[in-house]
Amino acid sequence: MKQCPECGREFSVLLVTVRAKRGRISRGFRHYILRTITLSGEHVFDFVDASGSDLDLRSRDIAYLCFFLFVGSVNLFVMKR
């Protein structure tokens, strides 16, 4: 965990290879299940995107996952390399 020097929030960054992505729309939100591979093994991320826009991720893409921690929730930002 690191701390943002500007706002003080804790965050973590993870470099992953995308194994699979599944997304579906429900009431204007897009729900994703993202399966990834890292050096420590496979991980599954289950999250909701309120903007409703699609993530352009394919199998074998390399992406950075940034987690911002809040009380009771986690914000996830995905940046494709």
Image (spheres, rainbow, N blue to C red):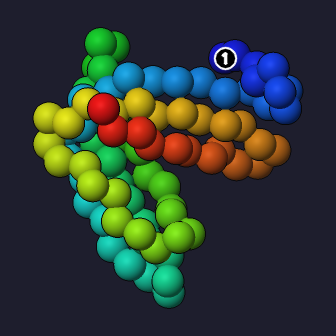
Near-viewer residue (44 or 50): 50
Between 41 and 32, which is closer to the camera in this rendering?
32
Whether residue 42 is visible to the viewer of this picture, yes or no, is no
At 46% from the left and 73% from the top, the residue drawn is: 52
Depicted 57 relative to depicted 80: above or below: below
- Residue 59, percent from left and from top: 14, 42
Q: Secondary structure at mark 1?
A: loop
Q: Residue at x 26, y 30 (%)?
A: 62
Left or right of 29, for residue 5: right
Please say if 30 is above or below 71.
below
User: Which residue lies most toward the bottom here?
Assistant: 27
Whole-percent x, y for residue 21 in the image:
25, 53
Query: Is there any visible trace of residue 33 in the rendered image?
Result: yes
Say if 31 sits above or below 45 in the image.
below
Number of on-image labels: 1
Q: Residue at x 34, y 65 (%)?
A: 54
Residue 3 place in picture, x, y as percent: 76, 19
Decide if residue 9 is on the left or right side of residue 59.
Answer: right
Q: Nearer the viewer, residue 79 or 32?
A: 79
Q: What type is the residue that disc 1 sits on?
A: Met
**Which image quadrant: the N terminus?**
top right
Task: Residue at 38%, 78% (x, y): give it.
Answer: 25
In this figure, which residue is indicated by the disc labeled 1?
Answer: 1
Whether residue 75 sits left or right of residue 71 in the image: it is: left
Quadrant of the rendering where the C terminus is positioned: top left
Comparing 72 with 63, the one in front is 63
**Quarter holding residue 79:** top left
Q: Residues within 10 Å of mark 1 (few under 14, many from 20)?
A: few
